[in-house]
Image: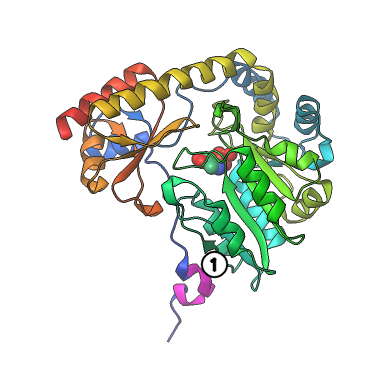
């Protein structure tokens, strides 16, 4: 008898729960027959892409018959100048999510250990599992990482620790003193992957800058993205700062042309779009307040957020509420995969988006 295909696949795949992305607008339109749909499910920028990035992409379209610069030289130079950090310590990814995979491919193998948490970004566990490592999941009380518990869980086999700061999906952040403490406790063979996908939104005075640790020679890979604050999620462009030796290891495992040419020029142009970034951050500050007050008025519990979304606890199973919202053209993100079965993560939009959400919720609840 022929073996079934699932038996041929690597055994570790059986333990991998697939990542469930936010539902696309087109899918909701097909399934529910609604037209006026808002998506507050994937922490995208409600203002759209940076206009400077759009213009750069349009200008670069005529050259897409050529392979991109696999080394992303110009973008790395630009990031290097902007952040005053050497270009050979900067890695460009097909989104920052790819960098999670590259760091695992370069540094993990069966027998080694990785640490993250049940309410940490889902991609970390998948990236570890693909490399044959089940990450150690350290509980996250109060929706945040427990640095003491992480330090206790570190063993001589620990190679990677994954932390998002601010964290997705909780929106919480670890203050500098705690990140300092964690880094201080890392043994020489362990690296901290500090995921700063929401870096630009975090405006608290005690929020640490991952690049500072990298500059100080700490074993840190700090990742960032153009997907959120610059509105380029569809193009896939992220980057990491790390010691050049760490970056060199990741170059060995990355696909040569991992970041496409349009994403590269868009990233370069977006870095110059200071007005867009400022407007995005201003809208986010106002939007966080607006979302929080509207959700609180509806009797819902929210978690304080340093990012561009709010984790909301509905106090009852989220599934039926999610479906009712979809029927009314509102897409949020149910948090079952993060062991938060009564919660949804809601991205900051514009006032009119929030109004539509509040109105739908007041009918449903
Ligand atoms: C914490 C975190 N890291 C990384 C990413 C992925 O970003 P990118 O679009 O750069 O792959 C996300 C996206 O939601 C995220 O929430």
Report x, y in % for residue 19: 45, 53
Quarter of the image where one finds residue 74: top right
Taking the image as shown, residue 167 lies to the left or right of residue 249, namely left
The chief SS type of the magenta part is helix
Image quarter for ligand 1: top right
> Residue at (57%, 57%) from the top-left corner?
150
> Residue at (22%, 41%) from the top-left corner?
321
Asked whether residue 194 is drawn in magenta, I would say no
Residue 28, above or below 244: above
Q: Which is nearer the eye, 1 or 195?
A: 195
Residue 199, above or below 120: above
Report x, y in % for residue 46: 45, 23
Residue 163 seen? yes
Location of mark 1 (residue): 134
Segment colored magenta? 6-13
Where the N terminus falls, by quadrant?
bottom left
Q: Which is nearer the eye, 70 or 343?
A: 343
> Residue at (58%, 16%) from the top-left corner?
278
Asked whether residue 10 is drawn in magenta, I would say yes
Query: Circle 1 — which element?
Result: loop
Q: How many marks?
A: 1
Report x, y in % for residue 261: 69, 33
> Residue at (57%, 55%) from the top-left corner?
148
Taking the image as shown, residue 97 lies to the left or right of residue 362, namely right
Report x, y in % for residue 25: 36, 34
Taking the image as shown, residue 209 lies to the left or right of residue 308, namely right
How many neighbours does mark 1 have within 10 angstroms: few (below 14), some (14-19), or many (20 or more)? many
Residue 357 seen? no
Q: Residue furthest top?
A: 275
Where the C terminus falls, by quadrant?
top left
Quarter of the image where one finds residue 313: top left
């Amino acid at each position: 008898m022929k073996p079934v295909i699932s038996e041929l696949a690597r055994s570790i795949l059986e333990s991998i729960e697939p990542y469930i992305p936010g539902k696309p607008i087109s899918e909701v339109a097909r399934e529910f027959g609604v037209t006026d749909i808002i998506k507050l499910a994937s922490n995208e920028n409600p203002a759209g892409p940076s206009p400077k990035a759009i213009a750069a992409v349009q200008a670069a379209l005529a050259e897409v018959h050529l392979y991109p610069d696999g080394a992303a030289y110009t973008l790395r130079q630009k990031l290097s100048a902007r952040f005053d950090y050497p270009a050979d310590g900067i890695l460009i990814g097909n989104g920052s999510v790819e960098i999670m995979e590259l760091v695992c491919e370069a540094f993990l193998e069966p027998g080694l250990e990785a640490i993250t948490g049940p309410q940490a970004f889902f991609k970390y566990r998948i990236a570890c599992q693909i490399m044959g490592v089940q990450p150690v999941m350290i509980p996250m009380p109060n929706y945040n990482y427990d640095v003491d518990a992480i330090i206790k869980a570190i063993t001589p086999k620990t190679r990677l620790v994954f932390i998002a700061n601010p964290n997705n999906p909780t929106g919480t952040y670890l203050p500098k003193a705690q990140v300092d403490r964690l880094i201080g406790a890392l043994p020489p063979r362990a690296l901290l992957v500090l995921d700063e996908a929401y870096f630009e939104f975090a405006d608290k005075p005690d929020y640490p800058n991952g690049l500072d640790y990298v500059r100080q020679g700490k074993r840190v890979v700090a990742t960032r993205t153009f997907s959120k604050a610059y509105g380029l999620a569809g193009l896939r462009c992220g980057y990491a700062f790390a010691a050049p030796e760490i970056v060199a290891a990741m170059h060995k495992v990355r696909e040569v042309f991992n970041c496409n040419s349009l994403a590269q020029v868009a990233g370069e142009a977006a870095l110059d779009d200071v007005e867009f970034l400022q407007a995005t951050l201003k809208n986010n500050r106002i939007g966080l307040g607006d979302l929080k007050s509207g959700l609180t008025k509806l009797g819902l519990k929210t978690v304080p957020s340093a990012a561009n979304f709010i984790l909301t606890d509905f106090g009852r199973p989220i599934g039926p509420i999610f479906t009712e919202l979809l029927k009314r053209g509102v897409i949020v993100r149910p948090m079952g995969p993060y062991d938060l079965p009564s919660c949804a993560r809601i991205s900051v939009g514009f006032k009119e988006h929030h109004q539509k959400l509040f109105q739908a919720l007041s009918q449903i609840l």
